[in-house]
Amino acid sequence: MDDTEKQPVHKRGYGVSTVYETLRNEIIELKLAPGSPVDEQQLSDRFALSRTPIREALVRLAAEGLITTLTNRTTIVSNIDFLGLGEFFDALTLMYRVTTRLAAANHQASDIDGIRALQLQFQTAVEARDVLGMIATNRDFHVAIAEAGRNRYYTDLFTRLLDQGRRILRLYYSSFNDVLPRQYVGEHEDMIQAIINHDIDAADKLAAAHADQIVSQIRSYITADNRQTARLPL
Amino acid sequence: MDDTEKQPVHKRGYGVSTVYETLRNEIIELKLAPGSPVDEQQLSDRFALSRTPIREALVRLAAEGLITTLTNRTTIVSNIDFLGLGEFFDALTLMYRVTTRLAAANHQASDIDGIRALQLQFQTAVEARDVLGMIATNRDFHVAIAEAGRNRYYTDLFTRLLDQGRRILRLYYSSFNDVLPRQYVGEHEDMIQAIINHDIDAADKLAAAHADQIVSQIRSYITADNRQTARLPL
DNA sequence: TGCCGACTTCTTGTCGACAATAAAAATACA
DNA sequence: TGTATTTTTATTGTCGACAAGAAGTCGGCA
């Protein structure tokens, strides 16, 4: 007798985290468009769960700012805040610097292996011209460095910022050319060396330069995009 | 006919935020002891709400790290992580510096009024030797400066760190002497002046010194406490 | 024809109940 | 008497249903 009736796919306490992680990824990877409505009923059907666990996952996402809930009204995927981009870049740059500095100061030998592995993945993605893979592995690479720095608060903020950055980069990934990324590979190598050498100042300088590169690249995408809209037929 | 039957005190969408804010305050003010269990049923009775909104409030608190949920088991008020205190102090100091710098750079004239008002409140609390008031108004003062700096990311992290600090200070508030706080009032005044003068370097230096003061004060409390426990009868 | 108000509908916020899981208690056994 | 095993119990995770708001719809009135 085949009693596969309504067997829930998720184990007991893992329903919400599944929904949370799935939605989180979809938001960051822009599979869910910014501003698009998030319907609880719909998600309930999709994940074969009651609305209660869905709701808890949404609360967590809202706490991270990935979705916005209008009380008693609809809840939407948070828009990308172009006006606040200056704040974002400032915080991102500082976190690049601080985490890399701390990695140079506090890392263990074992940390390097993990960082190297992720750098290799990034290099592979660059060579394969896999833009989406590049964005993701670049993020993982820097998170690994932050973790080697051993400061939870910086790592948390930095991770959130990098993921926010992934959203923005996704918007422009089509215009990603393959010149600059190759440069990133070299910069990553230099950063690893500075960390291994416990050279805090060098790590800081490299991280700052790296951040500037990325910020100016994103900025150039945005201004390029602005030009397009400015050329609207009138 | 007096039909005040079961009239819920909270309006529709405000149940969760009430619970969230109340519990948040109680945790920060140590009315709920770190490590003590948080019973959903009990809270449900207390707030005259179903377990569902209570649960959502708890999820938000967990996202902020104020409570810790062991899956399928009990959920407790997060313990104060004395081992991670180094990370905490490092992040706190950096945020003191960054937010004060930015306030000097980006503040509007109208921001100063609010900051001044809070500084006055702090001063009043110091003169009244109201330690608890001092802790709270000091926090508000620095949050106001951070807001004048206009960087959401820093303000958010800083607020969380300051509230975490409030918990730690509460632990030792009995040993708070009234010498150092008076010094804080002067330091606050200097910081306000530096901000008004748009003197970024001075603001940075003052903030760094202020942070060092507070960190070393907390450190002295903790070592004093350690000595006490070290004197246990054996 | 254009604007205002009642009505409908759709989504969210809340509720009480049930099921699963893990700790605690009770029992059996060596 | 101490340990292993079963049973109980308490608490969490999940569910389906109901009620309150808000948006959209329809009709009335100027």
Image (cartoon, coloured by chain):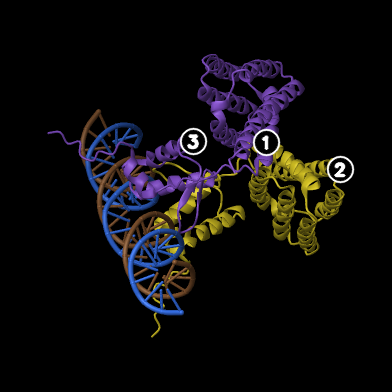
Chain colours: A yellow, B purple, C blue, D brown
Q: Is residue B39 left or right of residue B172?
A: left
Which amino acid lies under the numbered mark 1 shown in the image of this protein? Phe
Mark 1 or 3 closer to N-term? 3
Q: Residues within 10 Å of mark 3 (few under 14, many from 20)?
A: some
Residue labelled with disc 2: A202
Q: Secondary structure at mark 2?
A: helix
Residue labelled with disc 3: B30
Which amino acid lies under the numbered mark 2 shown in the image of this protein? Ala
Name the disc covering residue B89, or none. Answer: 1
Seen from the viewer's position, the closer of residues B30 and C23 is C23
Seen from the viewer's position, the closer of residues A26 and B90 is B90
Q: Residue at x 40, y 44 (%)?
A: A73
Kindly report which numbered mark, 2 or 1, lies closer to the viewer in this rendering.
1
Q: Residue at x 46, y 51 (%)?
A: B75
Q: Secondary structure at mark 3?
A: loop
Q: Which residue is outermost to the left?
A: B1
Image quarter hosting the N terminus of chain A? bottom left
State how far apart marks 3 and 2 are (Cα).
43 Å
Image quarter hosting the C terminus of chain A? top right
